[in-house]
Image (cartoon, grey):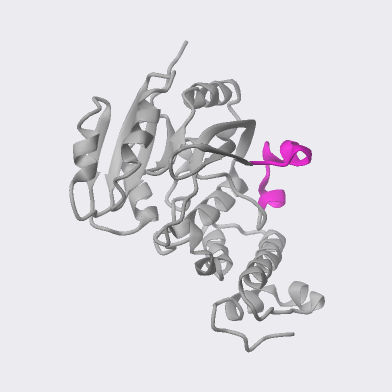
């Protein structure tokens, strides 16, 4: 049986506490042909290099701080594997994750990404009983060409996907200008071009804990990301004006829902304007301080 090389990219920045656990969960995989790349995004000391040196298949890289997207793109450029997986330094994997996902990709050549649900753990790595994944009645909507049902609604959970390396092209990388929500932008755009496969089983463990520095909990910074996402869709050379129109509409609805969920002063846009002027409202409405278009 062919055993393609898997590249696992683990990014880290000034967070030592869980990194060794993350690496160990990769080392413990039942699938053996794996290279691990530790991308240190400018941490103030060399904790990651010291931890990485404990593992024979772990390679350490240091770069000037540029953010999570920059660190992931750096890792992609160094990757030698046929398939690429990302793991945050505070999450970890089930030991069968890569084996099960490689099997799916090998048996389904038209699928370019396989993802799964994730079990939530606390600061100590203990299961909380919560699962992040598709509801039972939506499992069938997480596989195949999912672009239109996913746009503005859901993305893969960050520690779960395994992706063919050829997916990553000059116009389909992580946007380094996005500091919060880069996963949303990348995976929504990936869905436009590539089919995916969902395994309804928690193959990764997502750690939730109180830390204001975690980007994923800084939810107000997500407001307005849809405007940037639309610009990135245009850079993908989508020429069909009807496709671009519906992308604008769905992104506007998503932006409106996110803003109104997080802000005290709800922004209300008449339904007809959602469909007649989606680009105008995307460009003008969505930042924390802009309330001038209330009830437009």
In this orientation, which residue lies closer to the viewer: 296 or 157?
Answer: 157
| Above-or-below relation of 6 to 13 | above
How would you classify the magenta stretch by its main secondary structure? Answer: helix
**In which image quadrant can residue 105 be found?**
top right
The image position of residue 3, as x and y in percent, is 43, 17
Tell me if residue 233 comes above or below residue 285 in the rendering.
Answer: above
Farthest bottom residue?
Answer: 292
Q: Is residue 160 visible?
A: no
Residue 202: horizontal and vertical position, in percent?
A: 58, 33
Residues in magenta?
133-150
Please report the residue visible at 55 percent of the width from the left and 20 percent of the height from the top.
103
Left of 216 or right of it: where is 273? right
> Is residue 138 highlighted in magenta?
yes
Task: Say if 284 sits above or below 177 in the image.
Answer: below
Q: Quadrant of residue 23?
A: top left
As drawn, is 223 to the left or to the right of 89?
right
Give coordinates of residue 175: x percent, y percent. 44, 58
Residue at x 18% of width, y 51% of height: 45
- Image height of 127 relative to 289, above or below: above
Which residue shows up at 67% across the image and 36% down it? 143
Quadrant location of the C terminus in the rendered image: bottom right
| Number of numbered callouts drawn | 0
Can I make out residue 155 in this image?
yes
């Amino acid at each position: 049986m062919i055993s393609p090389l898997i590249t696992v990219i683990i990014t880290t920045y000034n967070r030592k506490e869980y990194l060794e656990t993350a690496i160990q969960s990769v080392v413990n995989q039942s699938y053996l042909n794996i290279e691990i790349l530790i991308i240190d995004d400018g941490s103030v000391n060399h904790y990651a290099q010291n931890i990485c040196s404990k593992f024979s298949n772990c390679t350490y890289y240091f770069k000037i701080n540029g953010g999570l997207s920059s660190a992931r793109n750096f890792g992609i450029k160094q990757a030698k594997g046929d398939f690429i997986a990302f793991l945050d330094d505070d999450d970890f994997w089930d030991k069968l994750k890569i084996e099960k996902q490689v099997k799916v990709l090998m048996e389904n050549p038209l699928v370019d990404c396989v993802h799964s649900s994730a079990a939530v753990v606390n600061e100590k790595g203990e299961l909380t009983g919560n699962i992040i994944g598709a509801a039972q009645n939506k499992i069938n909507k997480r596989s195949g060409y999912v672009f239109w049902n996913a746009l503005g609604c859901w993305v893969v959970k960050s520690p779960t996907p395994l992706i063919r390396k050829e997916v990553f092209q000059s116009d389909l990388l992580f946007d380094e200008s996005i500091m919060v929500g880069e996963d949303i932008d990348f995976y929504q755009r990936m869905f436009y071009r590539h089919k995916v496969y969902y395994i309804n089983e928690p193959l990764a463990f997502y750690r939730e804990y109180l830390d204001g520095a975690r980007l994923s909990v800084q939810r107000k910074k997500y407001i307005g990301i849809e405007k940037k996402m639309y610009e990135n869709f245009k850079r993908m050379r989508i020429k069909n004006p009807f496709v671009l129109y519906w992308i604008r509409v769905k992104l506007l609805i998503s932006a409106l829902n996110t803003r109104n969920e997080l802000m005290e002063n709800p922004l209300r846009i008449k339904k007809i304007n959602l469909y007649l002027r989606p680009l105008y409202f995307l460009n003008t409405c969505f930042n924390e301080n802009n309330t001038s278009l209330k009830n437009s």
